[in-house]
Amino acid sequence: MTPPNRYVRNGQLHSYIKYGFMVNADDFFFSLQQICAQAGPLSWATVRVGAEDIALAAAPVALHQRLLRPLSHLQQPSASATTLTLTLVAAAADAPPFPWPDAPQAGDFWEFRTGDYLFSHYGHGLAVVGLDLRRGCAVGYVRRPELLPAAFFSGLLFTTLYQALRPRGFFLLHAAALAWQGQGVLITGPSGAGKTTTMLQCVRAGFRFVSDDATLLTRAAQGDILAVATLNTMHVTPRTVDFFPELAPFVNERADNGKATIFLPEVYPDSMSAVNSREAVAPVRLLIVPSLQGPRDGTFEPLSGRTVLSEALPLSVDLQQPAAAAAHLDLLAQLVKQARCFRLHLPPDVVSVPPLLAARLAHLSLDELR
């Protein structure tokens, strides 16, 4: 049995440098680097999120393939300079555990910040990732990756990307994002409001998929707020699969919440934005809140930006970092000034929704030309 406050590595007993429950962050980050260095040959790839190049390295090859699959549509030739290098390896049995049990927790996710470091702990020991924000370097391990569902890797990847990109002006909105002829549409609202049905029906009809449920926004050089393509995954319920039967052959492992992961390029090959296309980032022109309440007539009810954000903000803004939260709120305030906000009363025939949105975007474009 391993004594308290110690761990075993390479057959030897090691001790954390403890201050209460806190170990020395430099030492723990170094231990994660050592684990990655000892994992054997790494497989490499480069992906682009917005204008930021991210290097992704992993061992063994099977782990690299699982990490790259949600980002395959963003893959690039190797870049000489990257914003972030993320290295993940399959953990040995003696990998050191996450040493901050009192860190802030949300469900089975823990996050500890100190100085330039940000350490994340997933699923009661399933994975640990350390991020050095100053150097743009993230290292970590995953235990028994072959047993974990696809949703686990999607969550880990998105969290790490967001942690690294937030200081560079990328901020989260709890919304799905689509693009039509270079114009962005955000779809937000409470669970059960029809967001997934609206988005999938639009993808069926030729809209470009940008992101599902959690969208990264950033400010372009000319000032527009852009929705940025990130993961190519969706997490769908059995009811959604029944409604869109073309999804059924592509259902991957179900997570504990019963939702299955779908990789959109496999279902709708033409739906994804190639990273060099103008639709890999899209200036947001419409912010839509679908509704199954009230009239089911396909009408657009104008909403104030405050009304829209009141529903999305609680799941979007981290108030624990005041400076980052202020920048986040400033970007969202600009977003609702830039985009027209509507409640869309969904018609019984959802096939008519994509033409309604396309017509509304065309109307907005004509208004801009006048």
Image (cartoon, rainbow, N blue to C red):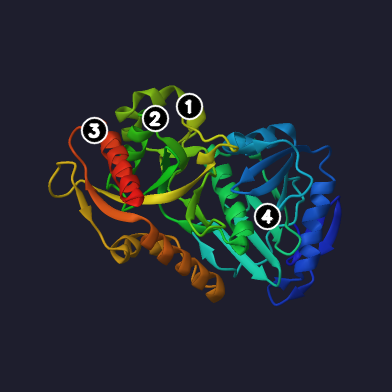
Identify the residue at horizontal 35%, vertical 35% (top origin). Answer: 202
Q: Which residue is mark 1?
A: 270
Q: Which comes before the other along the chain, label 4 or label 3? A: 4
Q: Which comes before the other along the chain, label 3 or label 1? A: 1
Mark 4 vs 1: CB contact within 8 A: no
- Three-letter code for the amino acid on which mark 1 is drawn: Asp
Which class describes the residues within 10 Å of circle 3: few (<14), some (14-19), or many (20+)?
some
- Three-letter code for the amino acid on which mark 2 is drawn: Gly
Identify the residue at horizontal 75%, vertical 68% (top origin). Answer: 25
Residue projecting furthest to the front: 370
Q: Which residue is mark 2?
A: 206
Mark 1 vs 2: CB contact within 8 A: yes
Give the CA separation, mark 4 to mark 1. Answer: 34 Å
Q: Which mark is residue 129?
A: 4
Mark 4 vs 2: CB contact within 8 A: no
- Element under disc 2: loop
Instruction: Give the camera-side residue of 225 and 231.
Output: 225
Identify the residue at horizontal 73%, vertical 50% (top origin). Answer: 82
- Element under disc 4: strand
Looking at the image, residue 179 sits to the left or right of residue 37; the answer is left
Q: Position of residue 7 (x, y in %)?
A: 77, 59
Give the CA separation, mark 2 to mark 3. Answer: 13 Å
Give the CA separation, mark 1 to mark 2. Answer: 8 Å
Q: Position of residue 315 (x, y in %)?
A: 42, 60
Give the CA separation, mark 4 to mark 2. Answer: 37 Å
Q: Which residue is mark 3?
A: 352
Q: Which comes before the other along the chain, label 2 or label 3? A: 2
- Three-letter code for the amino acid on which mark 4 is drawn: Val
Indicate the quadrant containing the N terminus: top left, top right, bottom left or bottom right: bottom right
Which class describes the residues within 10 Å of circle 4: few (<14), some (14-19), or many (20+)?
many
